[in-house]
Image (cartoon, rainbow, N blue to C red):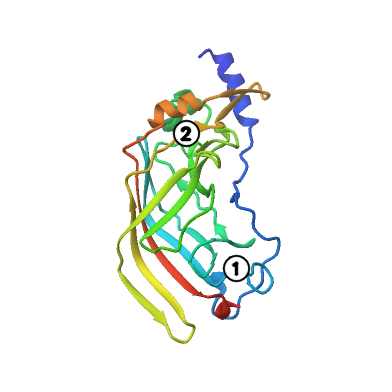
Amino acid sequence: MSLSLRKMARLSVLGVVAVAAVAMLAPAAQATTPNPGYSQFAGCPDPATENATVVNCMRNTVKSGNFKMGNKNVPIEKPIVLTGGVNTEGEGFVFNSKGGMLPAKQKVPGGVIGLTGLTWLLEFFGSEALTLYANTELAGQPKVGNPELVQLPVKVHLEHSVLGSKCYVGSNSNPIQLKLNFTGAEGFEFDEALEILRIKGIVFVDKTFSAPGANGCTLTLFGFIPISINGLVNTQSGLPAATGNETTQITDIETATAEKVY
């Protein structure tokens, strides 16, 4: 790449602004405050004022593990929290404005260079400035009622200004379908005073899901000409990938009846 083109590319990259992602299932506009001792269930709708179908409130916290798609393996270092409520069958997961899958940026090894192969970016940015984050978002209706098989349709937002604001693996119409199988747990605990059931250190594993290709990854040239780099991302990441993907998620679960929470 010539020096002049590199300068123009630099200006183009600097002109792109990353936008923070939000969960895609529509939450209620207002959330009721839980009773004392139940603040961790704030994302669960109050059945009296927000959603009459809710019977039980739950909070799942993925503490550690990994998420591998194609040839990219991302460690889970920031807790991923999913909170909301379910009906009497443990289905119909819903949440209010404080719930859903809360944003948790995970650092992607190799950064933007490893994802795109655009090594010339190092001439304009230090390696720290090219740190890439992956943020998992809901892309459909979870099924969380069966503790031995949690089903999560998700998409992964790849966040860096170089990639534009809408760079994803998976989408609402073509999500990554996780089927997380229970393989063990550290133990169970029941808080008799608050009637909260806690299951600690649950190990969920899925080695069968497929991963689609990237979409919406865009490098903007001259500040206004968008160029798709989905192909670069797919080539460097080994996507789409029908096999060879896997995730292990070490999770704590808390649950209580909505009657107690509110």
Earlier in the chain: of badge 1 and badge 2, it is 1
- Judging by the rendered image, the residue that carries numbered circle 2 is 112
Q: Nearer the viewer, residue 108 or 231?
A: 231
Percent from the top left, x then y, of residue 231? 47, 24
Q: Is residue 217 above or below residue 158?
A: above
Task: Indicate the quadrant where residue 220 lies.
Answer: top right
- Judging by the rendered image, the residue that carries numbered circle 1 is 53
SS of the residue under disc 2: helix
Q: Residue furthest top?
A: 2
Q: Please indicate whether residue 31 sits to the left or right of residue 250 in the image.
A: right
Q: Is residue 153 above or below residue 91?
A: above
Percent from the top left, x then y, of residue 261? 57, 77
Disc 2 crowd, CA 10 A, few/some/many (<14, 14-19, 20+)? many
**Residue type at numbered disc 2:** Val
SS of the residue under disc 1: loop
Tell me what residue is drawn at x 52 percent, y 72 percent.
Answer: 56
Mark in front: 1 vs 2: 1
Percent from the top left, x then y, of residue 203? 32, 60
Q: Is residue 260 above or below residue 87?
A: below
Report the Cα–Cα distance between label 1 and label 2.
44 Å
**Residue type at numbered disc 1:** Thr
Q: Quadrant of the C terminus?
A: bottom right
Q: Nearer the viewer, residue 111 or 47?
A: 47
Q: Which mark is residue 22?
A: none
Disc 1 crowd, CA 10 A, few/some/many (<14, 14-19, 20+)? some
Tell me what residue is drawn at x 67 percent, y 68 percent.
Answer: 50
Tell me what residue is drawn at x 53 percent, y 32 percent.
Answer: 215
Q: Please indicate whether residue 211 sits to the left or right of residue 97 in the image.
A: left
